[in-house]
Structure formats: C-alpha cells, structure tokens
Image (cartoon, rainbow, N blue to C red):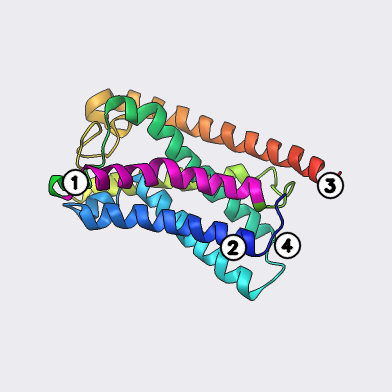
C-alpha cells in the first residue's frame, strides 16, 4: 500500500478533476441537459464525484476517517458502479456505436472525444485504482454487495419514470425513450428487458462478491 498523506490527496484531487471535467464537457456541450443527466454513465460519474469530494473534506477534518464501516460501504459502492459504467460501455454499448450525443458538432471532435473518454474510460480507471493504491484491505462485509446492487437497479426506476413523464434521450446507438437498447421493451420486447435486467443483476452481484473476495485476500497479504 502506498503511504497515505499528501500522495493520496494529490491523487484523489486528480480523480476529482477527471470526473468534474468529464461531467462539465458533457453538460456544457449538450443540446439537452435533462437528457444527458439521465444517462446512467453520467449519473455514476456524478455520484463518484460527490463521494470523492466528501472523502477529501472528511480526510482533512478527521484523521481516522477510514476506521468506519460506512467509509468502506460507500467506497466499495462507488467503485462497483463506476466499474459497471466502463464494462457496460465496452461490452454492450461501444460495439453498437453508442453515443450520448452530448457535444454539438460545432464544438469539435477533440472535445467530443474527451467528454466520452473521461466519463467512460479514464475516470472509471482512476476511481478503481484509488481503492487498490490507498485503501486498507479486508474491510468489506459479505452483505455489502446486497446494498451495492441497489444503486444500479434504482436507475431502472429513474429511467422509466423519466420516460413516462415525456423524457427523451438522444438515441444514437441506444434508445430514444430508455437510453439503452436493453431497457427498451419496444425494441427487444418485455421478455428481453426482463432477461437483460436479470442477467445484469446477477453479473453485478457476481462482480461485487468477487470484489469482496479479492479485498479479503488482499487484506490477508497486507497484514503479513
């Protein structure tokens, strides 16, 4: 484990900058703020940004802030939700040429590339690395994944409520009504959506429990 203190704070500041820059590039360049803020990938970045700012503030006020189960519950949660962002984008969305279509053409391809790269690739990597580089290992509880899974699943409630009230998405490589094709029952049917949600839930739980298992193994090595 890398020594705490100034190194970890500088690193987390870089994480905050990456998250904030990706969010701002998307929000300030979009033709619809409501639509761009309704994508899971951007919401996961916002949740992580809020958590990292909170962690930085608490670390300045309290030295032993990590001696608390809530810290590890939250840290594990944001690591999982941003990891899902990267995996879903790479496996299910990028092959379908998915875009959040957040950047107006006049703003240029570089900004469009950066807005996508930061939200779906760099920020998720930095958030996940923060756990491996700086967190104490062996503190995740076996019931944590049952809590972690609710954040991604709560997005389903949001997206269907947003759509029911007339909300729309850009639909480039995805769905105009439900953001992602695997949530659109008009495209793949109700059974297809149910199957997709079931598979995603199982995968999230599997990834989460593998994360807990890895954390415990790393914790044993750390204590040697």
Q: Quick one: SS at disc 2?
A: helix
Q: Which residue is mark 3?
A: 223
Q: Which residue is mark 4?
A: 67
Eyeballing the image, is 195 above or below 164? Answer: above
* Residue under the point 16% across and 48% down: 104
Q: Earlier in the sequence, mark 4 or mark 2?
A: 2
Q: Main secondary structure of the magenta part?
A: helix
Q: Position of residue 82 (x, y in %)?
A: 47, 44
Q: Position of residue 119 (x, y in %)?
A: 38, 46
Nearest to viewer (mark 4 / mark 3): 3
Compare residues 163 and 127 and report the one nearer the observer: 127
Q: Quick one: SS at disc 3?
A: helix
How far apart, in angstroms, are the residues tagged by discs 2 and 1?
A: 33 Å
Nearest to viewer (mark 4 / mark 2): 2
Asked if residue 127 is among those painted magenta in the image, a careful observer would answer yes
Q: Earlier in the sequence, mark 4 or mark 3?
A: 4
Q: Position of residue 53 (x, y in %)?
A: 50, 65
Q: Earlier in the sequence, mark 2 or mark 1?
A: 2
Q: Residues within 10 Å of mark 2 (few under 14, many from 20)?
A: some
| Magenta-tinted stretch | 107-133
Q: Which residue is mark 1?
A: 108
Q: Quadrant of the C terminus?
A: top right
175 relative position to 76: left or right: left
Eyeballing the image, is 40 above or below 188? Answer: below
Q: Which residue is mark 2?
A: 9
Q: Earlier in the sequence, mark 2 or mark 3?
A: 2
**Label pair 2/1, CB-CB below 8 angstroms:** no
Asked if residue 139 is among those painted magenta in the image, a careful observer would answer no
């Amino acid at each position: 484990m890398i020594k705490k203190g100034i190194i970890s704070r500088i690193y987390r500041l870089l994480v905050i900058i990456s998250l904030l820059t990706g969010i701002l590039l998307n929000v300030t360049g979009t033709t619809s703020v409501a639509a761009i803020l309704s994508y899971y990938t951007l919401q996961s970045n916002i949740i992580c940004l809020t958590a990292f700012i909170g962690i930085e503030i608490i670390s300045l006020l309290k030295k032993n802030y990590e001696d608390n189960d809530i810290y590890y519950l939250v840290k594990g949660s944001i690591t999982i939700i941003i990891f899902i962002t990267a995996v879903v984008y790479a496996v299910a969305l990028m092959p379908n040429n998915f875009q959040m279509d957040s950047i107006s053409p006049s703003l240029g391809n570089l900004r469009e590339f950066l807005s996508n790269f930061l939200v779906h690739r760099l920020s998720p990597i930095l958030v996940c690395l923060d756990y491996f580089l700086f967190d104490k290992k062996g503190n995740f509880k076996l019931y944590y994944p049952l809590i972690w899974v609710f954040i991604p699943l709560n997005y389903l409630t949001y997206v269907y409520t947003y759509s029911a009230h007339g909300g729309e998405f850009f639909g480039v490589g995805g769905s105009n009504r439900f953001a992602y094709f695997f949530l659109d029952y008009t495209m793949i049917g109700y059974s297809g959506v149910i199957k997709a949600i079931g598979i995603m839930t199982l995968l999230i739980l599997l990834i989460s429990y593998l994360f807990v298992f890895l954390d415990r193994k790393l914790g044993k090595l750390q204590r040697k």
